[in-house]
Image: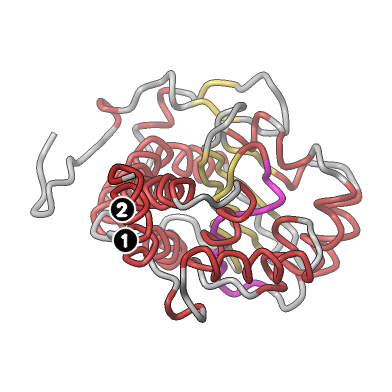
């Protein structure tokens, strides 16, 4: 494989692992394997160009947005969504980036359908494969997606069944032309490489969150208070935190008051990683002196 200027290894049919290249034409536990002859027909030059561009991103948000902006050269779409979530709580995305999404669609989805059909996002094909939502015969596609003008949808998932943080990418078309088998195959060919890029940009963020969480415990905060602090650091409002944690806004405000008191800060501006780690270090030194 050739190396490009940014260290990205070029890929092609010979480098594709057939074990990885299986996908579901429908929501099912029985993926069918891509015809090896189809691999030769994939637009490998475009695939490599796409990966070389998105591989330059160093942040999770940047990667998500760049993927949505660039993937149209391979898979033309009308609107797309890149979601990062914990497999255990799919209804509470860690990150949600969308491009050209119809107004109101995401609000209605998370306000209604995620509760009506809680099983839907956890299906194996969505967690770890490529699924064609167009073939899904249910209220979600007929009464929800179609109402927003959506006619064809495919989703690439990269989540394990247990406790795992991963991503899924949904691409939607409002035209009569559906996603062809070659396009589905190209989408799945990207999966292992997008998974690697995701791991590279998510690992530092996860390490940072784990470091802050450990420091918060050292400062004497409860697990719930620690969750509130991490969401405050993510710039969520009290109302958004309440919705994310499924608790009342008043309870969130009480947690925030106690956090400020415990960490000796007066407002959100003073609540940052340096302050938290400094307090944890001070507590550790104080306990040693005692």
At x 60%, y 27%, the residue is 162
* Horizontal relation, residue 165 to residue 88: left or right: left
82 vs 182, nearest the viewer: 82
Which x, y percent locates residue 33?
A: 53, 21
Work out which quarter of the rendered image holds the C terminus and state it: top left
Query: What segment carries the magenta color?
Result: 89-101
The image shows residue 43, relative to residue 23, as above or below, that is below
Quarter of the image where one finds residue 276: bottom left
Q: Does the magenta stretch include residue 94?
A: yes
Q: Which residue matches tag 1? A: 278
Residue 222 x %, y %: 60, 48
Which is more toward the observer, 99 or 36?
99
Q: How far apart are marks 2 and 1 (CA)?
A: 5 Å
Residue 29 versus residue 194 in the image, above or below: above
Pointer 2 local density, CA inside 10 Å: few below 14, some 14–19, many at least 20: some
Q: Which colour scheme is used?
A: secondary structure
Q: In this view, does 44 lie to the left or right of 270?
A: left
Coordinates of residue 108 in the picture (x, y in percent) = 82, 66
Taking the magenta stretch, the answer to whether it contains residue 193 is: no
Label 1, residues with CA under 10 Å away: few <14, some 14-19, many ≥20? some
The residue shown at (72%, 78%) is 103
Secondary element at image label 1: helix
Looking at the picture, tell me which residue is in the foreground, 279 or 276.
279
Image quadrant in which the N terminus is located: top left
The disc placed on residue 281 is 2
Image height of 264 relative to 165, above or below: below
The count of marks equals 2
| Dot 2 and dot 1 residues touching (CB under 8 Å) | yes
Which SS class for mark 2?
helix
């Amino acid at each position: 494989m050739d190396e490009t200027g940014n260290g990205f290894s070029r890929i092609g049919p010979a480098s594709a692992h057939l074990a990885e290249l299986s996908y579901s034409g429908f929501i099912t536990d029985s993926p069918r394997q891509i015809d090896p002859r189809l691999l030769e027909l994939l637009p490998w030059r475009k695939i490599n160009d796409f990966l070389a561009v998105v591989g330059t991103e160093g942040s999770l948000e940047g990667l998500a947005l760049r993927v949505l902006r660039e993937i149209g050269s391979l898979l033309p779409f009308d609107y797309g969504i890149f979601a990062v979530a914990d497999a255990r709580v799919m209804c509470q995305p860690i990150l949600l980036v969308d491009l050209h999404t119809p107004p109101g669609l995401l609000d209605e989805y998370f306000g209604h359908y995620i509760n009506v059909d809680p099983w839907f996002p956890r299906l194996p094909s969505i967690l770890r494969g490529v699924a064609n939502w167009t073939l899904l015969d249910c209220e979600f596609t007929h009464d929800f997606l179609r109402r927003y003008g959506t006619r064809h949808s495919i989703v690439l998932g990269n989540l394990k069944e247990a406790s795992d943080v991963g991503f899924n990418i949904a691409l939607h078309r409002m035209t009569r032309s559906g996603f062809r088998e070659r396009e589905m195959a190209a989408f799945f060919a990207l999966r292992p490489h997008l998974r690697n890029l995701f791991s590279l940009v998510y690992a530092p963020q996860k390490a940072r969150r784990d470091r802050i969480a450990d420091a918060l415990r050292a400062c004497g905060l409860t697990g719930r208070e620690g969750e509130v602090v991490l969401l405050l650091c993510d710039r969520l409002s009290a109302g958004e935190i309440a919705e994310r944690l499924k608790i009342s806004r008043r309870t969130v405000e009480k947690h925030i008051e106690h956090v400020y008191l415990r960490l000796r800060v007066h407002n959100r501006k003073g609540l940052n990683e340096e302050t938290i780690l400094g307090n944890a270090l001070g507590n550790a030194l104080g306990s040693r002196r005692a």
